Amino acid sequence: MFIKDFFATFGDEFPVASVLFERRFPTLIGRQNNRQNRRGITVHMKVRLLLSVSILLSAVAICFAVTDALSAIPEGQREALSNRLGLYVGAYRARDWAKLYELVSTVGRGGASKQDFVSAMKAEHGTDFAQMPDLLSFTPSKTDKISDGFNIYGCGKAQREGMKFNGIVVMHVVYEHDAWSFTGWSFTQFPNEPCKALEQPNWAATSRFDFAQPMEEVIHYKSSGTPFHVDPPK
């Protein structure tokens, strides 16, 4: 075994002798390589298993956290809301305003057609100059029932003109036309309230948020004097 290990370690320095050794004892070399391969495969499988378990546990933890955060929502509607919430944040992050339009409530749209809505969002969410931030992520923590729907509070991240912000976010949702829709979202305070405040059992928003009007982007677009088409009520 010493000779085999010697050439395995110093074969590059003694290439001729190493080749002769491999020709003379091919079975021995093959056994060693097989052991190394099996050992490598075993380690690789263990790493993959540990990663899979870790991901699974994280997913379960997130699932329970989201379920608890949406406890004020009727139980049979929580999964649907969670799915729509993911689509809403994803549309913002991708700046897919046409897709976002399909997720915004009737009040949030303010009667705007999809074309006008997309134009309004593009005008307010430029990359070099922007009036409004793009929502990048949102993790719900608490839900309050209000008159026409629910206010969901959680930790959010947003970006505006390349600068990123994070803090407590409030998002308003309503159930209409057999689906959950979003009227809008906002940071709860300026400067932004740190997310760690949500860990306090008695945390509550210090301000009331008016979501009984269209999204600010739509309001600004209307006030700019741009010809505005209003969809007829359905």
Image (tube, rainbow, N blue to C red):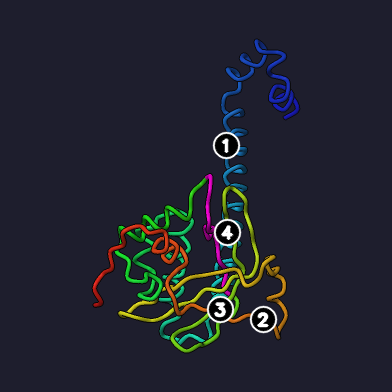
Q: Quadrant of residue 195?
A: bottom right
Q: Earlier in the sequence, mark 4 or mark 1?
A: 1
Q: Amino acid at mark 2?
A: Thr
Q: Is residue 78 left or right of residue 189?
A: left
Task: Say which mark, if any, is on residue 158.
Answer: 4
Quickly name the residue at label 2.
Answer: 206
Q: Amino acid at mark 4?
A: Ala
Depth check, mark 4 against mark 1: the one in front is: 4
Q: Earlier in the sequence, mark 2 or mark 4?
A: 4
Depth check, mark 3 against mark 1: the one in front is: 3
The span picked out in magenta is: 128-140
Seen from the viewer's position, the closer of residues 40 and 218 is: 218
Depth check, mark 4 against mark 3: the one in front is: 3
Seen from the viewer's position, the closer of residues 203 and 187 is: 187
Q: Amino acid at mark 1?
A: Asn
Which residue is painted at 57% across and 53% down in the image? 160
